[in-house]
Amino acid sequence: MATTSAVWREVRVLRHCVNLQQTRRRFSESGEKGWFRSLFVHKVDARKDAHSNLLSKTETSSLFKMQFHNVKPECLDAYNKLEVEVQNKLHRDQDYPCEVVGSWNTWYGEQDQAVHLWRYRGGYPALTECLDKLNNNKEYKEFRQERAKMLISRQNQLLLEFSFWNEPLPRPGPSIYEMRSYRLKPGTMIEWGNHWARAIKYRQENNEAVGGFFSQIGDLYVVHHLWAYKDLQSREETRNSAWLKEGWDSTVYYTVPLIRSMESRIMIPTQSSPLQ
């Protein structure tokens, strides 16, 4: 009898499993309007405009280029002198629609590295015009050949600036600069921008916010936040004070899950940098 009862229990369990599978199949075949699938399907509203137009300062039509040059350690001083000479010439020449926003050497982070931020007023047409003129400039070609002897590697990105961030204007200094670079999960740039559009107000008391940028060409879904501080102690105090403001903790809580990786550079401005 015990054996017979066990067999019938197994039969009932099997029938229940079959019925459950058939029920699930009916729900699955009923389409997206079925309540069962609606429990699991996340509907995303289609966006009517590009992320770059929703997040950037479209009225300024400025395009930015970030350059990262890894320099041979023994050549860093010579490299800086050469860059100062060339940057000053480009600034004085009104025929070139570009300007250097800031130039730095990395202090903490990637060692023997130079970072340059350029602005092209007029967007991509200005960038193309500038490159065409430089490619026909004999003196600039000689500069590039000389610079190449000093470099280990180089990388660049084309960026737009966030509409809600401060405009990166010249500063007298002396300051140290921190560039915090975030590599976001694809598809999260709008969410990042929404949170930081509210959060930037918490980081204005000490005039530390310099500029915020996101990549268009190069490594994608990359964000750069640029900050200025008197020194490392001032940086520590300023960052700690943000946690005393109601709402800053929520920004951190909601933006951290959007990040794949992040990096911090502490940088010292070069002699020719408008950001001192």
Image (cartoon, rainbow, N blue to C red):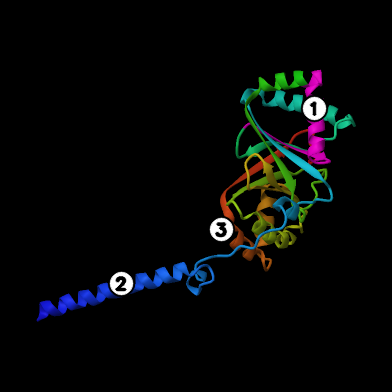
What's the residue at 58%, 56% (across, down)? 258
Please identify, in this view, whether the residue under mark 2 or under mark 3 is nearer the observer: 2
Q: What is the three-letter code of the residue carrying label 2?
A: Cys
Residue 173 location, quadrant: top right
Residue 71 in picture, x, y percent from top left? 64, 27
- Mark identifier at residue 257: 3
Which of the two discs, 2 and 1, sits closer to the camera? Answer: 2
Q: Name the residue under label 1.
A: 132
Which one is in front, 174 or 145?
145
Secondary structure under the numbered disc 3 in the rendered image:
helix
Query: Which residue corresponds to mark 2?
Result: 17
Q: Which amino acid does label 1 sit on?
A: Asp
Q: How far apart are marks 2 and 3 (CA)?
A: 38 Å
How many other residues sit within 10 Å of disc 2, few (<14), some (14-19) or many (≥20)?
few
Determine the secondary structure under disc 2: helix
Amino acid identity at mark 3: Pro
Residue 42 on the magenta span: no
Highlighted range, magenta: 112-140
* Residue at point 61%, 59% (across, down): 255
* Apparent side of residue 203 relative to residue 2 in the rendered image (left or right): right
Contact check, label 1 and label 3, Cβ < 8 Å:
no
What's the CA distance linking mark 1 and mark 3? 42 Å
Q: Tell me: 125 left or right of 236.
A: right
* Marks 2 and 1, how far apart at CA: 71 Å
Q: Image quadrant for the C terminus?
A: top right
Quarter of the image with the N terminus in it: bottom left
